[in-house]
Structures are given as structure tokens and as C-alpha cells.
Image (spheres, rainbow, N blue to C red):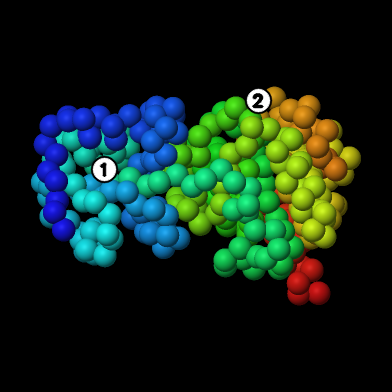
Amino acid sequence: MNVERITSRNARFQQWEALLGNRSKRHRAGEFLVQGVRPISLALEYRWPIRALVFDLDRPLSRWAADTLRSCRAAQYGMSGELIAELGEKDSTPPELLAVVAAAPDSLDRISVGTCSVGSSTGASFLGLVFDRPTSPGNLGSIIRSADAFGAHGVIVSGHAADPYDPKAVRASTGSLFALPTVRVPGPPQVQAWIAEQRAAGRDIQVVGTDEHGEADVAEFDLTVPTLLAIGNETSGLSQGWLEACDALVRIPIGGAASSLNAANAASVVLYEAARQRRSAATG
């Protein structure tokens, strides 16, 4: 395979550099940058389209990087160490390998309701999570990671929100973005229409939001049935539209001087509780 060498900030370099901080350009190009052994390996394992692999020309490659280049049919580019460092994360070691990956379509049909996600140990009952207007890419990536860890079938990002393909979100997900369908929607109406379709097909999904004024503690509420959990914006919580879309609201009891939990922490608590209840139900 021919390898193109990039040793100056040419048009292709500038195109990839724009993917780091320009959401509009990521959206128009339909692609994003990925670095790290686990994220790139998971992107390949879950068959995400790899448009290009970029490797460091100025140092010996690890066996993993060499094997990845050898086995992947994507276009390959050798880049000077100085330039590839500019495309890497600023607070980490310059990457030896970067992947340019095509973004997935924002279709709720990607989220399976009738069967378990691969590797799930929580039974066949659907579990999903919607994050309403997240502002922090890091929180969004952390929630995707937790949802994957606790057996969810998918994550929905609602409203004007952080981008799951932002480098900070991809990094915080530690590769779970590639294993767990993550779909962006404009707001509650699209999700409500999707839920109505599921209910019409005999899959009755309850929508359960988290709120400090919820009517029950999360541990006292039945999360073993098909459930879509709703987590609110880091500052203002669930929007009025999502509060109205919820069938029930639950609260997470907390103590100490804290007035609330970080959105990613709150999501992890309710996802863990759902997984705990399902394991208990499965073992009798």
C-alpha cells in the first residue's frame, strides 16, 4: 500500500487539525480523530469505517501500531513527529498512531430494544439513557463509558449539547463510544415518537428521570422493566420538555454538605442501581 508522507502543514493536515476543535467541520466532514490503543482497537473491533491511519514517521512503531497498519485497509499517511504531536491530546504523550473515523448516523434505529447489548449481563430488558443538553464533552464521554459498563443498550444526546465526537468526549469514553450506540436528537419529540413506535410494537418502555424532588428514591423504584433513564443538564437539570416526557421521577439520596451530584456521577449511580436490580432479579 502506498503511504503519503506529510511533513508540512499542508491542506490535509489542516483538514484534520480542524476536526479537533471545530464541531461544524466535524459534522460536515462526517469524521473525527481517534487516538489511543483501546479506542482505535475498539473502533476496528466494532467495524467503524476507518478513513485513514496516520503514523509517526520519526520513531519505531510498537507491535500493536505495526499490526494495525498491516491489517487495516484504510489509507495510510506517515507524518512527522512534530506534526502528529499537534494532532494529539495536549496533556498526553504524542501519539504513534491516529485514526480518522467516520461518524455513525444519528438514527435511533441503531439502538436495539428487543435484545441485549453484546456482553450485557443484566437480562433482556431494555436499558437506555438520555442526556439532556450536556455542556461538558468530558461528562458526556464518562456517561457513555458508564452506560456501557452497566449493560445499557444505547445513549441518546438530546438538544443543543456537547458533541460525542469531540476529542474530550471520545477520550473520556475510553472507547465505549464505539461499543455502545450513541445518537444525537434535536429534543424530546423525536425520542417520544420512537418510544411510541416501540410501545406499538409491544415493547413498553418507561421513561424515568432523575430530579432532587423525585417521588421515590432510585433504589425503591423498579428499574427491571424496559427503561429509558433521563439525566439533566449539569447546571439546570432536566428541561421542562423532558420533565413532561418522563413517566416517573426518582431522586438520589445524598448527605453531607453537597447539594447535588455531578451529572456523570448521578448517571453512574442510577445505571448501577438498574444493573443491581436486574442482577438480583436474574438470580432470584
Q: Amino acid at mark 1?
A: Thr
Compared across the picture, whether 95 is left or right of 146 comes to left
- In x, y percent, where is residue 165? 46, 39
Numbered mark located on residue 235 in the image:
2
- In x, y percent, where is residue 261? 67, 36
Assign the N terminus to one quadrant of the image: bottom left
- In x, y percent, where is residue 129? 67, 47
Given contact means CB atoms under 8 Å apart, are the residues at marks 2 and 1 in contact? no
User: What residue is drawn where x is 25% and y is 29%?
Assistant: 14
First along the sequence among labels 2 and 1: 1
Q: Is residue 114 visible?
A: yes
Numbered mark located on residue 93 in the image:
1
Compared across the picture, whether 94 is left or right of 101 comes to left
Q: Within the image, what quadrant is residue 217 found in?
A: top right
Q: Amino acid at mark 2?
A: Thr
| 259 vs 177: above or below | above
Q: Residues within 10 Å of mark 2 (few under 14, many from 20)?
A: few
| 241 vs 147: above or below | above
Residue lying at the far bottom of the rendered structure: 283
Distance CA(mark 2)–CA(mark 1): 33 Å
User: What residue is drawn where x is 14% and y is 51%?
Assistant: 3
Assign the C terminus to one quadrant of the image: bottom right
